[in-house]
Image (cartoon, rainbow, N blue to C red):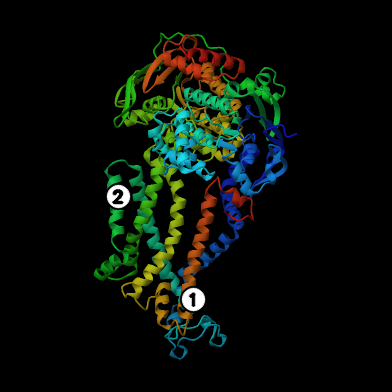
Amino acid sequence: MTETLKSAGEPPKGRLTTFLKLLWADKFAFFAAVFLLIVVLCAVFGPLLLETLATKQNLRGRNAAPFDLEAGWAMILGADALGRPLLPRIVVAAQNTIFVAAGAVFFSMLIGTALGLIAGYSRGRAAQMIPRLGDVIMSFPSLLLAVIVLYILEPSVVNIVIVLAITRIPIYLRTARAEVLEVRERMFVQAAKVMGASDRRIVFRHILPVVLPTLLTIATLDFAFVMLAESSLSFLGIGIQAPDITWGLMVSQGRPYLTNAWWLSFWPGLAIILTTLSLNLLSNWMRIALDPTQRWRLEMGGRKNG
Amino acid sequence: MADHLLEVRDLSVEFHTAAGTVKAVQGVTWHLDRGETLAILGESGSGKSVSASAVMNLIDMPPGKITSGQILLDGKDMLKMTAEQRRQINGKRIAMIFQDPLAHLNPVYTVGWQIAEIMTTHGTAKAEAQSRALALLKRVGLPEPEVAMGKYPHQFSGGQRQRLMIAMAMACKPDILIADEPTTALDVTVQAQILALMEELQHETGMGLLLITHDLGVVAEIADRVVVMNGGRIVEEGGAAEVYRNPKHPYTKKLIDAAPGKGAMPEERDRSAQPLLQVENLQLSYGAFKALKGASFNIMPGETVAVVGESGSGKSTLARAILRLEEPDGGRALYNGKDLVTMGARELYGLRRDIQMVFQDPTQSLNPRMTVFQLISEAWVIHPDILPRAQWKERVGELLVKVGLSREMAQRYPHQFSGGQRQRIAIARALAMEPKLIICDEAVSALDVSIQAQVIALLEGLRREFDLSYLFIAHDLPVVKDFADRVIVMKSGQIVEEGPVRQVFENPAQPYTRALLAASLDPDPEVQARRRAERKEALPA
């Protein structure tokens, strides 16, 4: 009787609470998750609430210093070269930044992983061709490719996402392929074959879960790279176009003033660093939480994960 | 008190792990004299290697800690020596050889260089070291020692590599040789040669030999005295023959009882009916290498057919070819009259239900990210017609009970089980398919002797209950003797002998089968002593 009750009531509720408990066990990951939640909220609601404030020029407040409470809360982080308050600008810029970075990382990971799985698992011609495709993309300087494509096409957010996604595909492709080549020879894959499992089941049920944590870790690191790549494109004038803003663009806009107004580049730079760091901490936690053989590290609580 | 060459007194070692402090060995005391062979016998986790590691200063000291005891070499306590003094002793006075020689040979240097290096680091001149290395290679019986000097480790076979390790260990004429499972990874015939070599070298140099093993047969073959360990403590100690004849501790008794090869051999079965599996001239090659050169045999319903042979004989390839994990080049494998070799993917999918496999290493054959429930029920995900989803939970519980586990274990992950329990899970998974034939590829070789006996008994019980047939691939002859109805002996991709188990074991027709039987070790020291005498007589002739 108790057994049936348990099995009926526990899984849906139990999974969420154990999930949160595991997250709480790793304090760094917990605060990283909280920070990322704030960033996402900024990205979703920021432009709606602070758009006008963020674009209002105030030439008397050019390069206003931070921590000056007299100018109002919006100026707490200072103002940029046109006197626009930095804090609302960072909040508003979160939307474009996160959209470009998340979009590019997501699509490059999706496509790269899919191609990598095919290249690693199939023994046919695809196994020969796909890695060469990755080589072709890698042999071409990614920024040059982006410059050419964006010069021909209209520089828009969607196009930037596409270009950045394409240039990052080989990273996931190569990693996924290399891991699949190793995992598919493991005994449990052979055992699944003996049971008559379809190729699809073997790839998605047995191989992908082993490969995914590695790819997710790479993706979080790539997040920062993509943000900075986007800022260099914006710097060259073929990325995000003003008055649209991103963190990367803000960093590059603040560059001429680095010697006399460090805060112009510093705050958006800090936002990039903190976001990437949080993602990294969270992915590190996830790698442990998703691996049944490692999970005890979190379940024991309080211990540093090694 | 300084009579003994090496003495370990009241040694206790702890390891600090995340799961708390593990007491690896507690109050262990043993000694080794010149010209004597001491065997430390125990199963995995018994702490049999720990005291030897402590002697060699191989215990990693932050997680590990020696909490009490002394290690006396000629009466001097090694634990009180400096690291530099210990280094002088290692290699020069005490040498060690390991289970896996390939992992302990540097792949980028020639073996000649590596052997000479040991001597040069201990202060021998280069030219002399070279000539000594050559002499050693000659002594350990490597073919063409001059050529062998310039070869790299991967160019040697497993047995030859172990000879190399012995040559390296002997380089500085040590007083003590510690051998940690030196022959476990080797074939039986090679094992016999290596043990004989170690014994000869011991007679020549008068060194003390400390042998760490799980194998009663090895103890019977070579040891003068034996120390039996269980759970970090010494449970019994004495002369090898005496301990085997009159074991005092219950654990020793259990260990000796579990040793395979003592049961009665089954009588021959009636083989006139339609065979379940009929293999005819099955062939498979990897490139130019013919791994399987035409194998033919039958398996009757309810019969256990064992395939024995040394590594590289093609016995695993045979299993993989029947299961179509590798595509055979030719021949037929008729299962109930249908040819498995030419079968299409759809028909093969249906037949997967009937023929299942249990792999050698359950640690690798169970997906570490799936729970036991998911592992076992995967059979029904793949073949939905076996069992409706509502009954899965109940049936998984039944299967777990059937293989000697409990229902509550269904939500655990494989790493939370011991090796023997994992193999039971793998067997439960195979049974979930309700197969007619189970192919066991070295299914018990990775297990401890007492666990091995339990798993064999489980397989035997299941055979009677479900009228299963087994194709049982093994290199361990005593296990086969207890369990199989028929034996197939393979050598270099060919079947050299086939017959009922009694006939093959009592009247082997082929010289190869006879050699294999002669090389396999009996746990009884007296039987081994008799065999050794026979072997010596046979040599001059």
A237 or B233: nearer the eye?
Answer: B233
Q: Chain of mark 1?
A: A
Identify which amino acid the numbered label 1 is placed on: Trp
In the image, what residue occupies the spot 70% across and 18% down?
A: B246
The subunit letter for the residue under badge 2 reads A
Q: Quadrant of residue B458?
A: top right
Label 2 secondary element: helix
- Looking at the rendered image, the quarter that the C terminus of chain B falls into is top left
The residue under label 2 is: A130
- Mark linked to residue B508: none
> If you read the primary sequence from the N terminus, does the residue marked by circle 2 or circle 1 appear first?
2
**Quadrant of the image for the N terminus of chain B?**
top right
Residue A267 - label: 1
The residue that appears at 33% across and 42% down in the rendered structure is A122
Q: Disc 2 versus disc 1: distance between alpha carbons?
A: 41 Å
Which residue is at a point 61% across and 26% down the rendered structure image? B450
Amino acid type, callout 2: Ile
Query: Taking B374 as reference, is A272 above or below it?
Result: below
In the rendered image, the residue lying farthest to the right is B1
Residue A72 sits above or below residue A266 on the image: below
Check disc 1: other Cα within 10 Å, few if <14, some if 14-19, many if 20+. some
Disc 1 is placed on an element classified as helix
Residue B294 rendering spot, x and y as whole percentages = 32, 20
Pick the front one: B332 or B127: B127
Q: How many marks?
A: 2
Q: Position of residue B282 (x, y in %)?
A: 33, 22
**Residue A99 appears at what percent x and percent y?**
41, 66
Q: Quadrant of residue A94?
A: bottom left
